[in-house]
Image (spheres, rainbow, N blue to C red):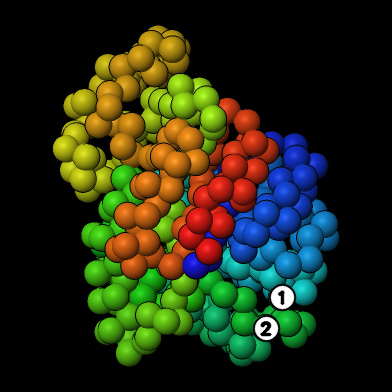
Amino acid sequence: MKFSLRLNNDHPVKTYVTLAQQAEAGGFDQFWVSDDLFLRSAPVILSAVAVATERLEVGTCIVNPYTLNPAEMAMMAATLDELSEGRFNLGLAAGAGDFMEWIGVGHRLPRTTTVETVQVIKKLMAGERAAFDGKALQWTDEAYLRFKPKRSVPIYIGAMSPKMLQDIGQYADGGLPLLFPPEHYANVMPHVEAGAKEAGRSMENIDVAACIWVSISDDRQAAEDVLREKIAYYGHAMSPTILEQLGLTHADFEDIDRAVMQENDIEKGKALVTEPMLKIGIYGTAQDVIGRVEKLVEMGAHHISFGPPLGPDVEAAIEALSQEVLPYFK
């Protein structure tokens, strides 16, 4: 089994160093940080983490080819891999269209652009010229790295839609599918496997991280409250496919969205979150978490990725995961 942590890029840089060292000591294998717009820079955060750790793999979760050109993405990935002595993973995806609207950046051909980005970066990492005449990317023969990468950095695709999940199996070294609810894993994997089969690849060579939301605390009510807040903010933006798994529709989130976005009343929004909505993630004590994660393992998951909210106290959450959850499965 492999275990990883995912964190948003909204903490001070020194906080990530502390958390990463704690995660490394606690037996985690990977440490991922998001790169959402207008928050702290994930490459800078991960540089600090790489210097302060020895074994822990680090990665972006995720960068996109619209706000970061694939050429710069490859430069960053190869440089961070050099700094970390071969411990960097490049997590990328198409990104969120509404974020692009904030800054007037187009979001044309998201799936095609993501796949072509993977293809050109793999060429660059192999030390090749990445001349490319695609639907989204048009590069000349002068597109090549002017230094030798330490290795071909593993590329993970962040995906939710069936076609993008298939692209994980067809093109990537790993996948970061968001599982809302966690049991959605059973619906995700057939798409990844179909892509691998089409490309003639073995699933043994593709690291699919079961990315779940976890809020863990000895205070079960406090853990639930943290998850409620996350759902109140983001539930309305989830895809119909995800909501269908829970027996919900976007209409179920209209009152919550109104309370949070228009009335600016997060407490009201949290109070409107229902029990079926809470199944989007996992909350409670270590034993609660173990019970839900066991189902993923029974489905065949080999990599569990714990992501925010994590809990009312992130350091305490990592401690609980390290001391109680990871040993149970290892």
Q: Which residue is mark 2?
A: 151
Q: Residue at x 19, y 34 (%)?
A: 248
Q: Residue furthest right?
A: 51
x, y percent for residue 299: 30, 63
Left or right: residue 127 versus residue 237 is: right
Name which quarter of the figure residue 262 lies in: top left
Left or right: residue 160 versus residue 1 is: left
Which three-letter amino acid code belongs to the residue tagged 1? Gly
Compared with 310, 156 (above or below) is below
Q: Residue at x 29, y 75 (%)?
A: 193
Sequence-wise first label, 2 or 1? 1
Which three-letter amino acid code belongs to the residue tagged 2? Arg
x, y percent for residue 227: 44, 30
Q: Which residue is mark 1?
A: 86
Number of residue marks: 2
Q: Residues within 10 Å of mark 2 (few under 14, many from 20)?
A: some
Secondary structure category for the residue under label 2: loop
